[in-house]
Amino acid sequence: MTTTSLIPRPFGRALCAMITPFTEAGALDLDGAQRLAHLLVSEGCDGLVLSGTTGESPTTTDAEKAALVRAVREAVGGRASIVAGVGTSDTRHTVELALAAEKAGADGLLVVTPYYSRPPQDAVEAHFREVADASGLPIMLYDIPGRTGTRIEPETMIRLAEHPRIVAVKDCTYDFLGTQKVLGRTGLAYYAGCDEHNLALYAVGAAGYVSTVANAVPRRLRSVLDAFDAGDTARAARLQRQATPLIDVMMSAGLPGTVTAKGLLGALGLPAGPVRAPLRPAGRETVDGLLAAYERLVTA
């Protein structure tokens, strides 16, 4: 038994922050979502996170979010966990979305820190507890202060870990020390939310990752974790480094990962469609760069 086999993984190891496919007219493409979900699971994803940042949750309606969960559940059955993004800046609305996701068939909830209003830590804690109390589903906290303006401070995270339904964290804090403090003092399952940290966090006890880049190369990213679990840390490091150029152009090119992921998937002939305004599609030069990085990785 490997050390990593003892780490709790309530939603699996290799999770994809799945894009939300739209038709060329901008409507929700449920058929495309089902085809993409089936492909991602067949290529090694054991969990799908829907309606997160990459899934364009700010511009999809409540009804679209629930329909997406139902469609993806139908497509993947019990082969993968489904974590539904329900976080908003409004506690009441978040609770409503949580209950709708539970009814639609989600296995868990992704709940982001309330944004824009920048609540203090006691209010952040109360928000998460109210959402956790409202539903029977396990919760993955989404800590991404660069977008929300508010951090879930480590001490707040440690207190929240006492709630029986708060079981995991998607970590986009870029605070490696803070993350290790929480890992050392709680049983929370941490998932890297920034692809460049997938292996680094896994090596210190994270459960896995929630990856945007996995929309394009799910098998290649999972191979990093597989190598590490097999005890071949040198291979794991090499595979992570090989993926770095694609991670760089998808996540650090000055465009949201949603834009680059849809640009690349569209160029590969996979379900994607346009992004919704105010986002704008990737330009030809960007798509060419994405394709070049993708080709170098898959032929490495």
Image: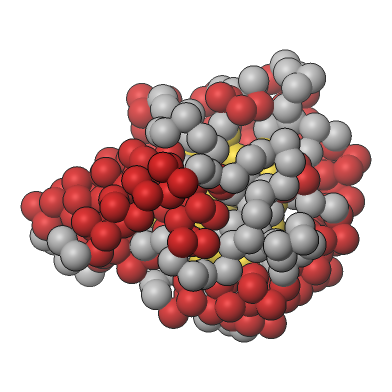
The residue drawn where x is 35% and y is 55% is: 291
Identify the image quadrant of the N terminus: bottom left
The tally of labels here is 0
- In the image, is residue 46 above or below residue 19? below
Q: Position of residue 34 (x, y in %)?
A: 63, 76
In the image, is residue 1 above or below residue 205?
below
Q: Quadrant of residue 8?
A: bottom left
- In the image, residue 196 lies at what x, y percent? 33, 40
Closer to us: 18 or 106? 18
Camera-nearest residue between 132 and 34: 34
- Residue drawn at x 29%, y 63% is 220
The C terminus lies in which quarter of the figure?
Answer: bottom left
Residue 292 at x, y percent in the picture:
29, 52
Is 60 displayed left or right of 263 in the figure?
Answer: right
From the viewer's side, name the closer residue of 176 and 288.
Answer: 288
Residue 120 screen position, x and y as percent: 72, 16
Q: Spot the residue most to the front.
A: 284
Closest to the observer: 124 or 170?
170
